[in-house]
Image: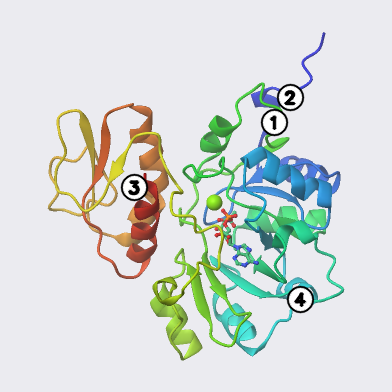
């Protein structure tokens, strides 16, 4: 009998023209793909196809009430799907393509599957910068719903290997095609901003710093601390979690723990997110280093303090969620 599932090697393609065509064709026929973006690898499906979007939830084991980001290949696509107001134009002009997701009201005739919004009357839209992501979406000719390509609640993938480990051979529900284009440059998910209400609100810190968004908007984003109920259901407290217990803001660990450091003053670290203390470098290394330390199966991953400014705010947000047991 033949194996009904493609082997790992068959699923994996490089970002060559034929690899991109295979990914676009898979999308067009309602299958899942994993593809690189500048933030993290995404698990993509045709956002206009209900069955295809439903497969994403199955593959990730993701709660149905957690809506998905829709990726487009041009701002004009976004204008067709959602009510793109003045603030959206302003932020898109400044930060797209890039690591910014905008939550906006769906247009009534929008071709998007209702599943991407998980029952809300809004949709989250992002125009990624990564050339390969752009080419795949453009070639498929449809908006692409894509959460990070990890199983729900676990650490986000910043390499094709991470994706592959999440859906090893023999598990049928994963992506049909994994497009490998090396590690992601930013390494943290996009910043999510809700523009669907009178006051613009930060739903998730990420690859674009809040300080830069505030400067572009000319007003301060409300931040989640000030919101009563978390509006973004994806901001579940325990998220991004490795198997190994993680603690943050400590200087040391026990002999059976591992230390993840940041900056030049940390000497005894097993790995250092950025020996020079560069937050951009730390963000790019964060998930890959957590993956790496997690595999060693020790009692604890201890992380030294990270400054809570710029990208550091997004890094600390992810660490807090990884640490919440
Ligand atoms: O960088 C990224 O954003 C990556 C890459 C693949 O683009 N994607 C990603 O998707 O991180 P995901 O599904 O892991 O996170 C999407 C976040 C979740 O917190 C979700 O709750 C929120 O966006 N979200 C999506 N649609 C929303 C909506 N309509 N209203 C509020 N929050 C929404
Ligand atoms: Mg995710």
Q: Label 3 near label 2: C-beta < 8 Å?
A: no
Work out which residue is located at the far front of the displayed protein and give it.
228
For label 2, the crowd category at 10 Å Cα-Cα, with few meaning under 14, some 14 to 19 and many 20 or more, is some
Precedes in sequence: disc 2 or disc 1: 2
Q: Nearer the viewer, residue 298 or 265?
A: 298
> On the picture, is 54 further left or further right than 310?
right
Secondary structure at badge 4 equals: helix
Residue drawn at x 61%, y 31% is 167
Precedes in sequence: disc 4 or disc 2: 2
Residue to which mark 1 is pinned: 11
Real-space Cα separation, disc 4 to disc 2, in angstroms: 36 Å
Q: Label 1 near label 2: C-beta < 8 Å?
A: yes
For label 4, the crowd category at 10 Å Cα-Cα, with few meaning under 14, some 14 to 19 and many 20 or more, is few
For label 1, the crowd category at 10 Å Cα-Cα, with few meaning under 14, some 14 to 19 and many 20 or more, is many
Disc 1 or disc 3, which is closer to the eye?
3
Secondary structure at badge 2 equals: loop
Is the residue indicated by label 1 positioned so its CB lies within 8 Å of ligand 1? no
Residue to which mark 3 is pinned: 323
Question: Relative to 57, does residue 162 appear above or below in the rendering?
Answer: above
Precedes in sequence: disc 2 or disc 3: 2
């Amino acid at each position: 009998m033949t194996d009904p599932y493609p082997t790992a090697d068959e699923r994996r393609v490089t970002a060559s023209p034929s690899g991109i065509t295979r990914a676009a064709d898979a999308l067009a026929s309602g299958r899942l793909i994993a593809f690189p973006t500048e933030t993290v690898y995404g698990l993509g499906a045709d956002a206009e196809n209900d069955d295809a979007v439903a497969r994403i939830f199955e593959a990730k084991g993701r709660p149905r009430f957690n809506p998905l980001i829709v990726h487009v290949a041009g701002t004009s696509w976004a204008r067709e799907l959602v009510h793109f107001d003045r603030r959206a134009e302003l932020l898109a002009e400044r930060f797209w393509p890039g690591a910014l997701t905008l939550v906006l009201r769906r247009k009534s005739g929008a071709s998007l599957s209702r599943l991407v919004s998980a029952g809300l009357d809004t949709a989250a839209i992002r125009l990624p910068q990564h050339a390969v992501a752009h080419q795949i979406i453009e070639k498929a000719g449809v908006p692409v719903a894509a959460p990070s390509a990890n199983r729900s609640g676990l650490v986000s993938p910043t390499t094709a290997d991470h994706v592959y480990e999440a859906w090893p051979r023999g598990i049928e529900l994963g992506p049909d095609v994994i497009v490998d284009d090396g590690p992601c440059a930013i390494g943290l998910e996009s910043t999510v901003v809700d523009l669907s209400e009178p006051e613009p609100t930060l739903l998730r810190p990420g690859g674009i710093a809040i300080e830069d968004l505030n400067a572009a908007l000319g007003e301060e984003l409300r931040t989640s601390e000030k919101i009563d109920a978390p509006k973004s259901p994806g901001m579940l407290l325990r998220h991004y979690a490795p198997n190994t217990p993680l603690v943050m803001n400590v200087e040391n660990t026990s002999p059976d723990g591992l230390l993840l450091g940041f900056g030049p003053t940390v000497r005894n670290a097993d790995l250092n997110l950025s020996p020079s203390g560069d937050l951009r470098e730390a963000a790019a290394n964060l998930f890959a280093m957590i993956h790496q330390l997690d595999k060693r199966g020790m009692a604890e991953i201890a992380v030294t303090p990270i400054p809570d400014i710029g990208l550091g705010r997004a890094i600390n947000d992810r660490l807090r969620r990884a640490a919440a047991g």
